[in-house]
Image (cartoon, grey):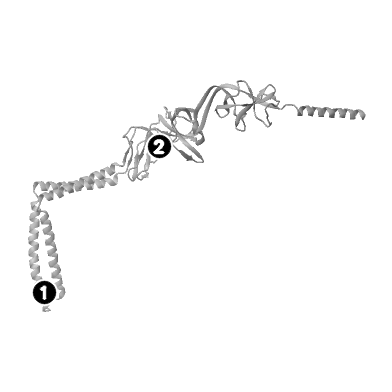
């Protein structure tokens, strides 16, 4: 029993001593060596594609779409017919207008050749006849009025005769007005000319309206959007097709407001599209935004980028991924971004100097998602502490552990 207690006592003392030694041992800290490399500052965001040169074909009038003469992806020339609307209702209007024009033309030609003497003679004869009937009617009315005074005829006979006389007088007045208008041939010709011009104008208007149903392409290019199908009813302004050049595209790249300072004209840009993995398009920043606009929950500026699209793989309206190469630092001293700490307003890193840590203020340059350039404060192969759960102090002892 005494031996057992003695051994137990020795073990206890040893354990306490072990704990005392390890409690006071320097902490083990992971580090990263300062590397010399080319560091590219890439701004990753998204955007949307649109053609540089394009035009929309829209319905100019209401009507049924009877024929659609192109397909999506088809190349067309400027002036090519894209679609045709129903013109049936306009054919009847054109025929009617042409008939009126022919009649007006015939009347005008008659004035040039004869001056319409037959119509004048007919009108003069009608006037003579009407005046004779008026004279006889007045005599009969006077006779009936005398008989009525003697109660020899009923009142309605007098009324009937009075109305007959008034009708003849009205007819004579109408004939006399028409006769006076026929009295001046130049005036008649002017009236006929106006009637003929109106008829011809009506024909042109109807034909123009019918022609609005023949829809043509205003530009040469590729049909990249085609909305309706044959048989659909179109209203004025309805979109039929979008046509444009797809070999050169413009991308609206949405850059968050705080990041706009990193973007400048001429910076190279890479574009990818999730629908074509592995494919990449190259371009440069052409124009910076003129205003900040809301985009869902973001405030962005629209940076315009021109890209070549020789195979027309990338289609307008696509939502793309954009990578703007904003800055490049050659032979840069770089560290993981998490190594850089803030002590008050000063940025710095903890560096191993032998078995102790040294706080060094640093000046940060270009950075990307994972690494940052140190312009001043470190040298190549310095061992910079990777922060963990240990409290770090300038001058403290530590054991460097390479995280692998």
Q: Is residue 193 left or right of residue 317?
A: left
Q: Which residue sits at x=57%, y=27%?
A: 364
Q: Is residue 277 visible?
A: no
Q: Nearer the viewer, residue 396 or 174?
A: 396
Q: Earlier in the sequence, mark 1 or mark 2?
A: 1
Task: Identify residue for label 1.
Answer: 145
Q: Nearer the viewer, residue 271 or 323?
A: 323
Q: Residues within 10 Å of mark 1 (few under 14, many from 20)?
A: many
Q: Secondary structure at mark 2?
A: strand
Q: Which dot marks residue 107?
A: none
Q: Nearer the viewer, residue 403 or 342?
A: 342
Residue 379 in the image: above or below residue 204:
above
Q: Is residue 140 left or right of residue 282?
A: left
Q: Position of residue 148 (x, y in %)?
A: 12, 76
Q: Position of residue 160 (x, y in %)?
A: 15, 70
Task: Identify residue for label 2.
Answer: 225
Whole-angstrom CA distance, mark 1 to mark 2, is: 88 Å
Q: Position of residue 230 (x, y in %)?
A: 37, 41
Q: Is residue 61 left or right of residue 158?
A: right
Q: Which residue sits at x=51%, y=33%?
A: 259
Q: Which residue sits at x=60%, y=30%?
A: 346
């Amino acid at each position: 029993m005494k031996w057992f207690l003695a051994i137990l006592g020795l073990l206890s003392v040893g354990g306490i001593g072990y704990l005392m030694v390890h409690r006071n041992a320097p902490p083990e800290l992971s580090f990263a060596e300062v590397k010399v490399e080319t560091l590219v500052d890439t701004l990753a965001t998204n955007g949307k594609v649109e053609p540089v040169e394009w035009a929309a074909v829209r319905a100019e009038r209401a009507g049924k779409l009877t024929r659609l003469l192109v397909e999506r992806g088809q190349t067309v020339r400027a002036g090519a017919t894209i679609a045709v609307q129903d013109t049936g209702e306009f054919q009847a209007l054109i025929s009617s207008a042409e008939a009126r024009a022919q009649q007006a033309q015939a009347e005008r030609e008659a004035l040039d050749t004869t001056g319409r003497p037959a119509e004048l003679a007919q009108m003069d004869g009608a006037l003579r006849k009407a005046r004779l009937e008026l004279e006889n009617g007045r005599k009969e009315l006077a006779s009936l009025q005398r008989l009525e005074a003697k109660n020899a005829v009923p009142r309605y006979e007098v009324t009937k005769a009075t109305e007959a006389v008034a009708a003849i007088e009205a007819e004579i007045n109408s004939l006399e007005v028409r006769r006076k208008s026929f009295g001046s041939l130049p005036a008649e010709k002017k009236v006929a000319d106006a009637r003929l011009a109106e008829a011809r104008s009506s024909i042109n208007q109807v034909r123009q309206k019918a022609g609005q149903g023949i829809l043509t392409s205003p530009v040469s290019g590729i049909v990249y959007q085609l909305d309706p199908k044959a048989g659909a009813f179109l209203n004025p302004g309805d979109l039929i097709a979008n046509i444009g050049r797809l070999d050169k595209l413009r991308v609206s790249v949405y850059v968050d407001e705080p990041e706009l300072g990193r973007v400048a004209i001429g910076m190279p840009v890479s574009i990818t599209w999730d629908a074509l993995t592995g494919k990449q398009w190259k371009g440069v920043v052409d124009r910076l935004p003129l205003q900040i606009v809301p985009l869902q929950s973001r405030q962005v500026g629209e940076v315009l980028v021109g890209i070549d699209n020789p195979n027309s793989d990338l289609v307008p309206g696509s939502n793309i991924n954009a990578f703007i190469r904003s800055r490049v630092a050659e032979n840069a001293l770089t560290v993981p971004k998490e190594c850089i700490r803030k002590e008050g307003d000063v940025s710095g890193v903890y560096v191993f100097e032998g078995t102790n840590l040294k706080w060094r203020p640093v000046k940060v340059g270009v950075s990307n998602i994972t690494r940052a350039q140190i312009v001043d404060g470190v040298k190549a192969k310095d061992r910079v502490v990777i922060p963990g759960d240990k409290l770090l102090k300038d001058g403290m002892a530590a054991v460097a552990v390479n995280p692998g």
